[in-house]
Image (cartoon, helix red, strand yellow):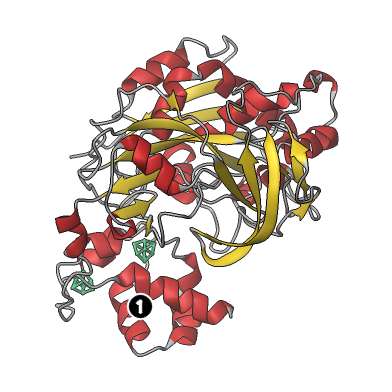
Amino acid sequence: MLSFFEKTFPHGVHPPTHKSKTQAKPVRRLPFAPELVLPLSQHFGKASTSLVHAGQEVVRGEPLAKADGFMSVPLHAPATGTVDRIELMRTARGPKTEAIVLKVHPGAAQEVLYDLPQEISKMTQEELVDAVQETGMVGLGGASFPTHVKMRVPEEHQVDTVLVNGCECEPYLTTDHRVMLEQPDDLLAGIRIAMRTVGAKKAVIGVEDNKLDAVKEIRAVLPQDDSISIQTVPTKYPQGAEKMLTKAILNREVPSGGFPSAIGVSVFNVATLAELGRLLPHSRGLIERVVTVTGPGVKKPGNYLVALGTPIRFVMEYAGFNGGAGQLILGGPMMGQTAASLDVPITKGIGGILVMTEEDASKRPHTVHPCIKCSSCVKACPIQLNPSYLGMLAHKREYTVMADKFNLFDCFECGSCSFVCPSGIPLVQYFRIAKAVLKN
Ligand code: SF4
Ligand code: SF4
């Protein structure tokens, strides 16, 4: 039972956390795969534009593609090698997309050769936002929204607080947990960059109370002036969602269809800011990320630092798995999606691979029974939608009614409703389909 004073949000669910297999495992770097596949579109917004051609030699860290406008980010070479070809390749997002295929030089060094120190303390707000864009940074929590876009606050909004999301409420995943434990100084550097770009005087780091070791590590490096503080929140799903964290820590409500900046808040994920804090002073680009590989079907669960573009098949061989793609969920069990193939690459937004046993995987999809009107989904939905009614409308393909009268687009697909439904109704999948139909 939560105490009256605990900082949290209404509703939500308590799935088993399953983090013990990897939470104490330090991040380990994976070797390079012989070939890396780098989609030009691995972020929200416009694809980047290639700067290279087949046969070109590139060094680790060198820009391979430039941003195509403000809602786009560049792409950098994760390894030293030769551009083999640029062609349509399959990605975890589904449809084929143009990608640069890089043949890694045998024995290529892990050292980043492209490095240009810059004095970020002397940069103006605008210059800082531009420099962040040049890193190719996107939200590493899964949304892959370009970070520099979040940092340019609309003129009509004024941000007073940067909220830093260290909740990692998805079961099984421990990427953010390890980053907080292993890179507290980088995180602080990234928070200061975020505060300057959005013009906030204050930052609060929200961490769930099942990661108290990370809280201790971060507390030790916090400044004395209270400008940056840390706040524990109860372990509850989806505590790490932007709206839920803002409500829990600041008791402010993000308006329906609006952005947190409208209520004076900018929200960033811990891994995003820690990586930014590491890269920006050296004008480096995002070329690798931490991926939790875990679950009952893998022999060597762990937190691996993986070069972008590494085929999932390569990661899985290293982690001790020889099953099929149907056993893999990219992301966590609540919001992740089944892998389409083992040959899709790790991209900027993939923070976890959950490996089911063959037996578990074959049990999906569940048998679906009729709705028994138990209202469990209504009690679980953190934004107080009526998933049961939305599900019924989805069944009848009344998608426009769902959007116009029942706020379908407020649903951020957390999966809490599907998780509690005793009838096994795949509510969140219905909502994803409805949104996709309406957007096309
Ligand atoms: S998936 Fe959507 S409808 Fe279901 S609980 Fe989450 S926000 Fe509510
Ligand atoms: S949880 Fe499932 S069975 Fe219960 S009301 Fe919601 S849709 Fe119906």
Q: Which residue is mark 1?
A: 390
Residue in the picture at 62% in, 56% down: 44
> Residue 109 or 202: which is nearer the viewer?
109
Q: Is residue 227 visible?
A: no
In the image, taking residue 232 as reference, residue 157 lies left or right, namely right
Would you say the beta carbon of the disc 1 residue lies within 8 angstroms of ligand 1?
yes
In the picture shown, does residue 176 fall above or below 97? above
Residue 221 placement (x, y as % from top left): 52, 11
Q: As rendered, which of 140 and 361 lies closer to the eye? A: 361
The front one of 79 and 333 is 79
Q: Residue at image x 58%, y 44%?
A: 36
Q: Position of residue 353 (x, y in %)?
A: 36, 46
Q: Whole-percent x and y of residue 380?
A: 27, 59
Horizontal and vertical percent position of residue 208: 35, 33
Task: Estimate how packed mark 1 is, as few (under 14), some (14 to 19) or many (20 or more) residues with alpha carbons within 10 Å.
Answer: many
User: Is 354 rendered above or below residue 227?
Assistant: below
- Going 81% across and 48% down the picture, which residue do you hit? 51
